[in-house]
Image: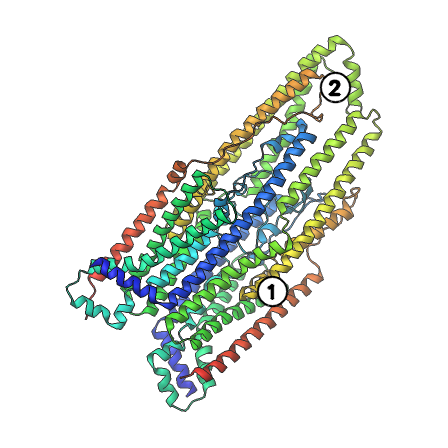
Amino acid sequence: MLKTLILKEIRSNLVTGKILLISLILLILISLSLYLMYESYKLQVENYNIIKPKAKDTYIVKPPNPLSIFGFGMEEYISRKYKDDFEGVGIPDAVTVQKSLNRFNHILPELDLLNIVKIVLSLMAIFLAFDLISHDRETGSLKILNSYSFKISKFLHTKIFVNLACLLIPFALITIIGILFLIFYTNLSFDLNDYIRICFFLILSLLYISLFFLVAFLISILFRNSSLCLILGLLFWASSVFIIPNFAVIGSRYISGDYYADKYSLANWENFIKYRFLEEQEQLKNQNTKNELIIRNKYVSKWHNASSRQFNAYIKKQQKLLTFINIFTRLSPVGFYVLPSTIILGTSPFDDLHIKVKYANYLNQNVFPNKKKQISEFEYFDKKDLVNIFSSFALNFICMLILIVGLLFLIYNRFRKNRY
Amino acid sequence: MVFHLAKNELLKSMNSKKQLYLFSIIFVLFILFTVLANLNLLEKTSSYNEVYDSRENNIANFSHANRTRGYLSALIKKPRLINSYFTGFSIQALTTDIFNKSEKQIFKSIDFSFLFAIVFSLLALILSHDTITSEKQNGALKHVTSYNVSRPKYLLGIFLGGFLYLFVFFSISYFFSIFISVVFFQALINEQDFYVFLLIYGISVIYLGIVFLMGMSISTFCKTNKSSIIISCFAWIFLVIIIPNTAPQIAERAIKLPPAAKLYSEAYKIKETDRDRLINEQLTRLRKKMQIPDFNAENFINERKNFLLNKNNQARYYEFRKQAEDLVYKINNKQKAKVIKLEDAFMNKLKKQENLTASISSLSLYFNFLNSLYELSNVGLKTGYYEIEKHDRHAKKIGVYMKEKEFSALGENLLYDHNMPIDLSDYPRLKNYESSISFRLEAIKLNLFIMFVYIVVFSLICFIKFKNYDVR
């Protein structure tokens, strides 16, 4: 019986051309994405080679992250020049950002694997599952099937796993082939740490797609009309992918009392003008040349203290904001996927903040109050980062598994009650 | 006949509970977006006032020629309701001035353009995907075509009936949203913005009509509702996500630009290193010619004071300062012109790249609509460039103003230094930086034409396919 059911599902998918259509779209999208993102990475490397710091420079330039090919996230603002000037620590400068300057990129999301899974694959999962049960009900085949003696679990297993496999297997295969192609035919070099991160990212992607599939499947069980199931599925997709995450960000900004980099930068610029002005006035009045350096140091230290206060306030608010975003986005499956994936790939907003704090400490140790003769090398990563990455993966992996098990439980439970 | 069919279709839609629920949800979403846009406007306005006051305070209390110049020409735009509805490209994204320090968000922020272009277009597809297929499936089409009914008229009736429902709902939501903003949040709308809101309304209705037509034309091809909705959604993904997203990347491959960092380092060399060297060389020459000693930097103030005790020296020194100021001004301008030339060459290439991106993207209906919204709201690329030009002219004006101020300060006090306080409170302010409505309409005429082409193409597909439909 199980074999017959499996064969029936596979046949129906092959006959309707679903697998072919899905594979074709995935092939176009994934290969295009990997190629374009790799080209973008190459441009970043070119930029990096021009602006990278020399031995005694106190500014730092974070080298481009090859994993950004899979999930660009905040990479544009992470892999760039960090400097300390009158505008404050670590505020991005338009010309040192290593991304393309084409302004259309400002209004469109990057075509990376992360966005493809987030938007397109989740939509495909909804299309695949929205009528799996409701269609059988509408055509009456479910009634005929019920007249035979068969196990509900077997029927549902087949429906769920065969259809899910039609989506997940082409995705996984095309992605793996694409990554292998990148490794063997380009100059990219990944280490073991990178491979582990890619695996974590792929596992989260598969779970995320499964979540959307199961939700659509549940809707298909709950409602008899296929078009209603589709509308509800699309509504779930639009709200999960676009509306909830964006409202979560807006809500978090209101709660945390947003403090933009613009404001922080402007406040620092004003401080700089003010203290330079006061210093110059004192220098003009000063007759003794010996005092010049003392006056200068006095105002530099005043400016530095004011700047540090601004920086600490900025970091505190940003951390608060990110914590709220991290919590609120979890109202949608996207919350378990996008931010954690960027954390795993090293392109999350946390990474940006992390480097800013590290760089401020580095400056305090090496440059302020007096520049050291021997400046220590800036380290971008430490062991703590790896622990963070693993804990982020483990936490979201478990959460998604719990959601999947919960959905499966609901599916079996509702189907047992609503099967006729 | 057409009106009878349209009325029937409209009644069918109005009686459908499913559609009513859907519209209720989207209506709530509309109100939510309105509230958020207005809260955003309030926040931006308070931030604007804060920044503006602080700048004026700084200019009044801490300004001197040396560091305040760039501060005077920096553009701070007053927030408007229309730009809270449609954020588009900010002027900051187009220039590289000191305020270009915005932080990227991991989730790109959404505004009304998202609601119109994504949510409403999906809604239009959901409403139209089964207009013909459902008639085919339940056999009603066989009955209707067996009567003496003109097929084009039948199609027109179905389109009018289905679309009228969407149109009425959209119109109510749109004007109710503006009503909330004006009455409850007391947002100010000037005459120009009022016309812009009306124009955006018109273009949005056209856009929704085209998406509805697209759904209908796909429906004429398909046999079942399911295949129709799947094809419609894939067409939507293609037009909304794939084409606009790949366009910048394809354009970047076709027109390659050198890395931005290279331009930056070259510009820095011309503007800073070369300029300082040139100024030093020419000042030394002038000093020799006019017999002005090179005061020791460590004891500059005292040495200069002693030198100016002699009255003969005073006149010579005044002449020297005037010539030196002029020299520095000229060298600065010359070096700036070189940088501008360099940047222009880069920007021209970038513009070409962006134009190609726009051309490829204009294949997508979504982009044409989005671009129209942005240009009309004065946050598009063309309107942005217009503002930049105006801003550049203003920056030049500031440069002339500063030179005059410095000369008059020098005339009053021979010991004048660039770091001395200077009254700049009457600096020329950039008041009107907005483009006119006719300029904005000119900017979107290609988009409107392409949208018109879409209407013709989808209508033709619909009519031809439906006319040749074999009922058997």
Give the quarter of the image for residue A217: bottom left
Eyeballing the image, is B36 above or below A56?
below
Q: Residue furthest left?
A: B148
Give the quarter of the image for residue A18: bottom left
Q: Which residue is mark 1?
A: A197
In the image: residue A358, left or right of residue B466: right
Q: Residue at horizontal 55%, vertical 26%?
A: B397
Report, in whole angstroms, how far the alpha carbon at label 2 lies from the one at label 1. Answer: 63 Å
| Chain of the residue that carries numbered disc 2 in the rendered image | B
Kind of residue at badge 2: Asp
Which type of secondary structure does the marked residue at label 2 adopt?
A: loop
Residue A66 spot, x, y in % from top left: 58, 57
Residue A127 spot, x, y in % from top left: 41, 69
Q: Residues within 10 Å of mark 1 (few under 14, many from 20)?
A: many
Location of the C terminus of chain A by quadrant is: bottom left
Do we see residue B450 in this rendering?
yes
Q: Which mark is residue B300?
A: none
Which type of secondary structure does the marked residue at label 1 adopt?
A: helix
Q: Which mark is residue B294?
A: 2
Q: How is the image coloured?
A: rainbow
Kind of residue at badge 1: Arg
